[in-house]
Image: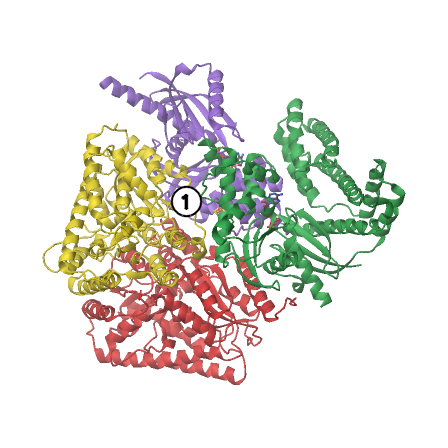
Amino acid sequence: MSSTAEIMARCQGLFEDLNYSDARAWKAKVPGRKVVGFLPVYVPLEMVHAAGCLPLGIFGGGDQLEVIHGDAYYQSYICRIPRSTIELGVTGRLDFVDGMLFPFVCDVIRNLSGIWKMMFPNVWTKFFDTPQNFDSSIGGTYYVHELQELREGLENLTGRKITDDDLRRSIKLYNENRRLIREVYAFRAREPWRAPTSEVYVIMRAGLMMEVEEHNQILRDYMDAAAREDRPQRDNVRVAIYGSFCEQPPLNLIKSVEMAGCYVVDDDYSLVNRFLTEDVPTDGDPLAALAETYLKHSVETSCKYVPKEEDKGKFHVESVRKSGAEGVIYATPSFCDPALLDRPMIAHRLTEAGIPHINFKYAENSGQMQPIREQAGTFADSLKLWS
Amino acid sequence: MSEAIKEKSMLLQKDMISRNYEAITSKHETGRKVASTFVPGNLNELLMCFDIVNNLPEINAIQNGMRKVSGNYILEAEKHGHSEDVCTYVKADIGMMGKGNIAPNGKPFPNPDVLLLSYTGCYTFMKWFELLREQYKCPTLMLHVPYEGDGHSTKNMRDYIVKQLKEVVIPGLEQVSGVKFDIDRLRQYLKNSAKAEDGLVWCLEQGKIKPSPIDAYFGGVYYIGPMFTAFRGTPESIVYYEELMKEVQARIDNKLGPVTPDGTPFNDQKYRLVVEGPPNWTNFREFWKMFYDEGAVVVASSYTKVGGMYDLGFRHDPDHPLETLADYCLGCYTNRNLPTRVDILAKYVEEYEADGLLINSIKSCNSFSAGQLMIMKEVEKRTGKPGAFIESDLVDPRYFSAANIKNRLESYFQMIEQKRRGTGKAA
Amino acid sequence: MRCFIGIDLGSTTTKAVVMDENTQLLGRGITNSRSNYDTAAAVSKQEALIDTRLTLFRRGLSAVPEVSGKVDSILADLERNFRHVQFLEQLDDLEQTCVRNVKGPRYVGKETGVNTALAEVFKQLRQSSHALFQPGARRKSDFFRDLAGSDFMQFGEPVARDAGLPFDLLVNVYDKSIIEVENRPPAGDMEGKFLRALEKASGSGDIDSASVVKPVKDALAIPLEETYVVGTGYGRVRLPFPKEHIRSEILCHGLGAHMMYPDTRTVLDIGGQDTKGIQVDPQGIVENFQMNDRCAAGCGRYLGYIADEMNMGLHELGPLAMKSNKTVRINSTCTVFAGAELRDRLALGEKREDILAGLHRSIILRAMSILSRAGGVKDQFTFTGGVAKNEAAVRELRKLIKENYGDVTININPDSIYTGALGGATFAVRAVVN
Amino acid sequence: MTEIITAGIDIGSGCVKTVLFKVNGSDAQWLAKETARIRNRDPFQLANDSYEHALKHAGLKRGDVAYVASTGDAENLKFSTGHFYSMTTHGRGAIYLNPNTRSVLDIGALNGRAIKVDASGKVLSYKMTSQCASGSGQFLENIARYLGIAQDEIGSLSQQANDPEKVSSICAVLAETDVINMVSRGITAPNILKGIHESMAVRLAKLLKSIGSTDGLVLMTGGLALDTGLVAALNEALVKEKVNLVAESHPDSIYAGAIGASLWGAFRHEKLTRLVKAA
Ligand SMILES: Nc1ncnc2c1ncn2[C@@H]1O[C@H](COP(=O)(O)OP(=O)(O)O)[C@@H](O)[C@H]1O
Ligand SMILES: Nc1ncnc2c1ncn2[C@@H]1O[C@H](COP(=O)(O)OP(=O)(O)O)[C@@H](O)[C@H]1O
Ligand code: SF4
Ligand code: SF4
Ligand code: SF4
């Protein structure tokens, strides 16, 4: 049985490694293995897994990467994640990646897929679109075809067929992964001092850089270890953080928020592994199952259209209630149109529901934490002193 | 643009626009229904089938930008919690509501009866109408147009759009308007569209002549006006383009350049440019002047393709009414992937014999801007012609820095000039 | 003789270069632009003409056998003494201006006290000025404002304390007056000043007056005719010249770098508020360029803020940063926040030199992005602008160029700050001669 | 209710502010105040010295103080009992200085903060300016120095303006150049200062609106509160905005953070004592 410190050392190592040595080693181990990178927010990882590939989460360069060439491709008023992603590419850090998936998030990631095609013509690059029409017969039909296209693309890449049974097996593993993650989240919401978000977050990020089987084991081990260890409970308030679904904040920011007196009990960081909120059925046609789960049981986030006005923000309000958060910090990357355009609408809904909220912006390489501490700290003060 | 000298086509257009604003603002008297919808991927012919008047928030934002009121509207929106970082078209629109929602004709805008969210090429449209929907609480019809990520459309995409048209959009519009859908009416309008489209394409292609009888950017935004807004499919737009063609032909015959806002023909054309990206509206004339003062004419632009890429051969096809609408939506400029955009721009630089590609990068608009530096590099590489990059915004006056833009433009033109003279003998 | 002049009106400094018709460089002059632009242009031009005289002296003296081998030291003496004469003259002006400015409600009842203190401070300033102009003395800056200013603060504080006056009163009267003085171009009569300097220098014994005075006087007699002036730089639109005398700073920098290093293909210029990456062809013609956008993060002024925050001269930052062997990563390069970042880091217990090294690296990282945007770095590479004087910045640049572009010849000229003006002067020659 | 002594220490980016209070229930008596400009010194050492100074002034010893509350950049202050964040303390301090306060604008050297409070000093909402230093106190200070104007003269000069000149740049650095341009165009110092004040005022008005302040008194705290020109410009901007807000300053505005800390310290102390008793 490992301690949280041991688990964290493994995950931290993966999380910080901008050379992706682990994924490289995975690929080198068996000739012919392929690695497929993906960007936030959602792609069906089970499909990549079923193809025998390693899905590798590429979530920007964080605050340790010096961006030189990436800036040459983006104006100052565009968020950071595409430029650090380009930096990773240009500096050869992704030279072992055989395919790249650019999901439907926003115009920035969308256009990045085109840049990738031009810059790395030898990499299989796919823009992966998810429907914004949630009717099974309309959006569903379209999505099944898109999934089929993705399947064929992967088959082309690996030179082997993906059978329905391959897919079902992978879906099962990922159902397990999602279930365990839901458990970790519930555990943290119950006893946030035992599972600080600065740890949970790193475990989630690391999980997107390893095989799902290993991650499942780590999740189990972590919950065991964390429940056993004696960690002091502090006089902190409970907050949920939303708006951080794409470009990720620096780990220091998460730590600063915790230091300023907040327990983070819910978040939308690296959403991909919680995007589907229920198990994907493993009987019947797996593509239809994936499509149907996406249409009917996926999170609300800024990159998905909400068909009914009255449903906007409902997901957030419900998550706040479920996790027992006392307030919401809506923390968005600077220049993130999806999150920032959503912000007033979500804010209205939270206000209507009587949930206190604040917002601020960050960049993946933010260095100055003082304003963050001050804003989060004041929020904590105010929840502590007056509620 | 009050004191500008106007040609007949411009007066025609002005009249069309004001009649449309009249139709919108008088909806309570006339009982007509009003839809809000966007330029790229707009389904004007379809709306006409339901006698619905078309109100385009982007056009309102442009009007407000040119009338120099957008700055205040944007501030108003920011005061209500909108971020400084996001698209200013959206904020100018939301802010206008906050300030009484007055149309350019001075009358209040009525609330729309339906938001037709036929979004293509830009993600922000979706958020924009979610925001409007929150205000107006009116029916919202979403038409999701997939992005051409691989540089072409697929049957799946087309089927998806047609299905949405059949099962979501048309029934929705029938319900809002109480008018039954008549596909033959649609065919007739589409026929009108195709005819007008021929005219527009002819005009834009005259940029190949030297001196160019048109300015395909500053002038171009007028030429595309009727086609991109509420008039595609109407007989008036056919008349407009016939008039425009006559004017252009007259200039060709007399070897004249386009008419500048000062009213003089711009004949002394030293530099020919292809421009990528939308213009700035708040300082539109000042911006244009920076070009013609230096002798730069724009011979082709991408902005004039956001509402449809007709020059690549697409025409609305009355024989396949719904399919043609789908193809139209899929093919708008910003719905094409970056490699395709590079192909198009490089082709323009070559076919229009331009001195280079100038990019006006818009702070607001990720759809256009994210990736433009890569576009510039690629086009430079392919054509061997130098590119230049300036930055401004659509309707936020805070982001128009005349000195900065002028500095870059002058340097760019002097550079082209120096290069032309070969050895450094230039002075 | 015909003189061709290029003036580069930068955001922080204004530079002038004088050339003869064969594009031979005659003189350079610099002043800070923190004053009215006409004045800045006039002052820098005057400085360049002074330098031109020195060149002419050199030419004259080189023909005099008696001084062979001593020309350098004679000229250096002459210049030091000339500068000293000029300095004292400006100091007098400053003192009179200060006295005039001791008025208004804040000074009521304290006039005499302040005046006495001022007299004392200026006495000390005059005394210390000798040391400033000693042979081999290292001056913090070339500008009167900086030289007089730092000593004024240094002497002022104890004087004020002893006199029981708030130091702020003195600072304020200084701040007010220095602008006025700066906005008055130093009185003309260059010849007279040179003659006085010559006297002073020969008074000191090591100059053989007879053999030197005549060639110097002869050189002073040569009329300097301003044949053509070209203006460039940030403030060029405000220059008092017609449009055809004005060139884009990009072109001037490209051409200037080409004049210095004909094999240059890539030029980086880091100025006060902009950073430019320029590609030039073998003729010095600009092929491509990029500059920072509407945010001045990470430009030269950034270092100015840091220097202020640390109470140091700009010249001293580089050497201190060089002492570091560990770099602290700094991500935010907002020029104005530089000070805050510094404080933040100091509070975290980082060492000053390490933070400084980090700040220098972040400036250069930004410059590297602009270079990358302008098409990368080709052989040879020339670094120009004020920041090229900073050794720590140069060290980081060399490292990063090597890492990203391999072995590239890197040219850095001690006079690189004049690159734009040099290009301007070259354009001036071409306008007339070709 | 027992009478206790509490201290509030506010470490800012420009100065350290220290206060001492005697608190008895809702009754608070101000015993001492100290400001020290940091000027490249170690702020923690400075805080320590200031604190000593203040104690001496009030005739007290360290042991007499029940709760030392820090605020500002002072989370790591060794001798503090607890830390409150700036906006919590500025809100409370502002209510102490003027009980009619409903919104607080705290404008320091680098950041601006708008805070909406209720009558008890409870923070209802707040917002900080962004990471870009445009329109900050530091910027104004630089310009003033360049113009040769002392900080306490800025206000009155600005109010003498007859034709304020707009500052167009968003960037504080480029704006400085703008200003230098203005000087060379012969624009007078009052018109330049007023122009800067106006552009700051617009931003501040926006900040206030964004936290939902629509009526009542706005108390300015922090270093720039004493700048009467800014207060005047802000009031003009508020009138133009047609909001029912009036901005005022207070001679002790600069202490608002420290006062708030001291008073929340007392509140917290009482709560803790009660908890201990209950236990
Ligand atoms: N001796 C020096 N050592 C280090 N840096 C210097 C020195 N002199 C000038 N600088 C830097 O150079 C900048 C000015 O560069 P310059 O090329 O003159 O700019 P501009 O043309 O915009 O006036 C200053 O802001 C300063 O940071
Ligand atoms: N009388 C005054 N008039 C104008 N500005 C002032 C005055 N006194 C102080 N300041 C400005 O106030 C700022 C410091 O304010 P303060 O609230 O102490 O900031 P911080 O909390 O960040 O240290 C400085 O920028 C200084 O220039
Ligand atoms: S951070 Fe926001 S704007 Fe940037 S790529 Fe992600 S979703 Fe798009
Ligand atoms: S982002 Fe661009 S395309 Fe999208 S709404 Fe704004 S201006 Fe239009
Ligand atoms: S971040 Fe700093 S340097 Fe950049 S615009 Fe803002 S104030 Fe200017």
Residue B358 at least partly seen: yes
**Drawn colour of chain B?**
red
Name which quarter of the figure residue B345 lies in.
bottom left
- In the displayed structure image, the side of residue D200 where residue B236 appears, left or right: left
Name which quarter of the figure residue B374 lies in.
bottom left
Seen from this angle, which residue lies furthest bottom?
Answer: B253
Q: For this rendering, which residue is in front, A40 or B81?
A: A40
Chain under label 1? D
Q: What residue type is labelled 1?
A: Leu
Q: Where is residue B208 in the image (x, y as percent from the top left)?
A: 48, 78
**On screen, A325 above or below A209?**
above
Q: The green chain is which one?
A: C
SS at circle 1: helix
Q: The purple chain is which one?
A: D
Seen from this angle, which residue lies furthest left?
Answer: A283
Q: Which chain is yellow?
A: A
